Image: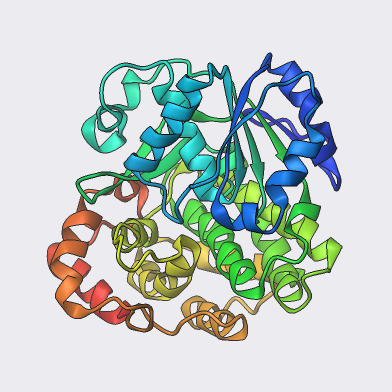
Amino acid sequence: MQLNYFNRPYFENGAISKLSEVLIAQQINNPLICTDPGLSSVGMTDKIKDLISSDFSSSFFEETPANPTEEAVMNALKVYKDNNCDGVVGFGGGSSMDLAKAVALMANHDGDLMDYSVNEGGYGKITETIPMVAIPTTAGTGSEVSVGSLIVMNDGRKLIFASPHLMPNAAICDPELTIGLPPVLTAGAGMDALTHCIEAILSPINDPPAEAVGIDGIEKIIKEESLIRAYKDGQDKDARWSMMMASTEGAMAFSKGLGAVHSMSHAAGANQVLRLHHGTLNAVILPSVLRFNQNYVGNKYSRILRAMGKNQSIDLANEIEKLNEKIGMPNSLGEMGVTEDMIPELIAHAMTDPSNITTPKVPTLDEWEQLFLTAI
């Protein structure tokens, strides 16, 4: 199946076999493949090496951290330049794909990486990057079809980089790559996809097609029970297919924006001591923000509950908490190591996050504090 949205995703079981074909189509002869130590340790990097034709000269950067850092981007960029690469492949979860996007950006842009962040007014500075291909191995971020990248900077801030030029030129979405993903990663990634769908729908931006895509993603995740099925049985191919599609749909939907869940998650995820999983943070924070937004979104909660196959009169936040419990998510940020003394720094980060542009109601300083206290 070939989907057409903004870039070209090759979406089917076994799609990874098309890697050489995709590289040729993108005129990439010497790719830098960005991945992480976990995938390397289980032999996934070797699989990529075996699939790439000997006609290509490939280089690898296998040290992508769980939350990609500016330092890692610069290290990968050095590998890119030292080996005269002409394209980038992000192979892994959202971290590897986000790092690959940042490398593709800095490979032909001058100045410092920070200059191009949304936070620093860099959106309009980003022009065409080098060719880039994304290959997700989790079903959560949807980074393979999104215009954004998240990088933890040397100053400790987790910044957003966004531009149509950061969308990968092609994406290889092979649900079979997620077969056997551990339950905890399946759950966290799945809640990331669900949060993308929900926050996109709640965004006040009027974009019915994107909203409809988000509704379909929620149906796949909840109504079809794909997340619970994939969590319970890592070999369930149908569930894995639906979760990867929902992940891709989540990123398509959030072309209309995200919200305060992501502002808070980005703030907590910037902590390089805790190194918290982004999707798990979203899962834990989502109920608190849903309760905060309840009076500012019209009938959208009813529409989301209908997509979930639930009675429209029930409490949406409670339903998310029940789902979190079923898939082993933490009960609070406190369980994840976040403490009350961190709140001032978390608020300072969250208040400046660009996700606030499309949140239904921007919290006041006191409301940010209460949201973090409730989540902790």
From the top left corner, tell me how far across and down residue 264 is, in percent: 32, 62
Residue 227 sits in quarter? bottom right
Q: Position of residue 223 (x, y in %)?
A: 73, 70
Could you tell me which quadrant the C terminus lies in? Answer: bottom left
Residue appearing at x 65%, y 27% in the figure: 58
Q: Does 152 appear above or below 18?
A: below
Visible residue check, residue 215:
no
Residue 138 in view of the camera: yes
**Residue 105 percent across, percent down from the top left:** 43, 25
Point 64% across, 48% down: residue: 249
Q: Nearer the viewer, residue 272 or 160?
A: 272
Residue 79 sits above or below residue 329 on the image: above
The image quarter in which residue 342 lies: bottom left
Foreground of the two, 248 or 27:
27
Q: Is residue 38 left or right of residue 299?
A: right
* Colour mapping: rainbow
Residue 334 lies in quadrant: bottom left
Q: Residue at x 43, y 20 (%)?
A: 107
Judge by depth and name the residue closer to the eye, 15 or 243: 15
Relative side of 74 to 54, left or right: left
Q: Is residue 136 above or below residue 182?
A: above
Judge left or right: residue 313 versus residue 334.
right
> Where does the image place residue 229, in percent across and percent down from the top left?
76, 74
- The N terminus - image quarter: top right
- Left/right placement of residue 184 relative to residue 237 reads left
Total labels drawn: 0
Rendered residue at 61%/80% (across/down): 327
